[in-house]
Amino acid sequence: MVALENLRWKYSHFNELSNREVHDILTLRQEVFVVEQECAYLDADGYDPVAWHFRAEDDLGLAAYARVLAPKPLGKFEDHSFGRVITAMRYRGIGLGRLLLANVLEVIEENVGQVPLCISAQFHLADYYSAGGFVARGEIYDEDGIPHVQMIRHPEKLD
C-alpha cells in the first residue's frame, strides 16, 4: 500500500541528477505520455538540461514529477513555467496530484519569488490547474494530438 507520508520530495537541476534519476524520470514520462496516452512525440525536447526537476519518491521509485523552466530564452514561455506534470499509476486517486502542484508552486515561490507562471495544460486538466490559481488564456489548440490550453497564474491576482 502506498502512502503520501512515505514520500521523499526532491528538487534538483539536471546537472545534479544521477544517471538512475534521469532514467527513472524519462521512463515514467514515456510510460504515461507516450504509452498510456498513445501519443508519439519527442519527449527529450532539449529543455531537460536547463530545467529544474521536482519529484516525489518512495521505496518503489518515482511517484510524481514536474519539470520547472525559467523564462525565454532558456524556457518555452516569456514567464516561468512548469510542465511534464505526472503521477505514477500506483499513486493516482489519493491526492498526490494536488499535493505535487502545491509543492511545485511553493518551491518556485521560494526560489524565484512570486512570479507569473505560464503553462501549456492538457485541456481535460484545466480544472486541476484552476484549483492552483491558473486561468485559461486563448483558444484550445492541438499539441501532439491532444487538446491543450495555455494557462497563466498571476500571484498578485490570488486571494
Image (cartoon, rainbow, N blue to C red):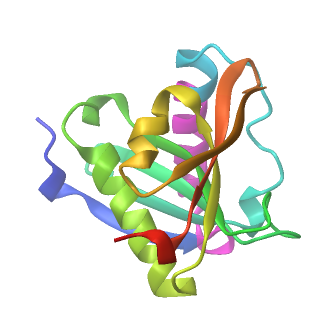
Q: Quadrant of residue 47?
A: bottom right
Seen in the picture, residue 56 relative to 137 is either above or below; the reply is below
Going by the image, does 136 lie left or right of 142? Answer: left
What span is colored magenta in the figure? 13-32
Q: Is residue 22 above or below residue 122?
A: below
Residue 89: x and y in percent read 34, 28
Picture quarter with the N terminus: top left
Farthest residue, direction right: 73
- Give the position of the C terminus as an image quadrant: bottom left
Q: Quadrant of residue 121?
A: top right
Residue 52, position as x, y percentages in the image: 61, 68
Among the 4 quarters of the image, the one containing residue 10? bottom left
Q: Residue at x 35, y 49 (%)?
A: 131
Relative to residue 43, is residue 108 depicted above or below?
A: below
Where residue 75 appears, x then y in whole percent? Answer: 79, 64
Residue at 36% over, 46% down: 61
Q: Position of residue 134 (x, y in %)?
A: 50, 54
Answer with left or right where residue 149 lies relative to residue 109. right
The magenta stretch spans residue 29: yes
Q: Is residue 148 left or right of residue 106?
A: right
Q: Is residue 37 magenta?
A: no
Q: Residue at x 68, y 73 (%)?
A: 15
Q: In this orientation, which residue lies closer to the viewer: 74 or 23?
A: 74
Magenta stretch, main secondary structure, is helix
Residue 75 vertical position relative to residue 99 in the rendered view, above or below = below
Q: Is residue 56 visible?
A: no
Residue 94 appears anywhere in the view: yes
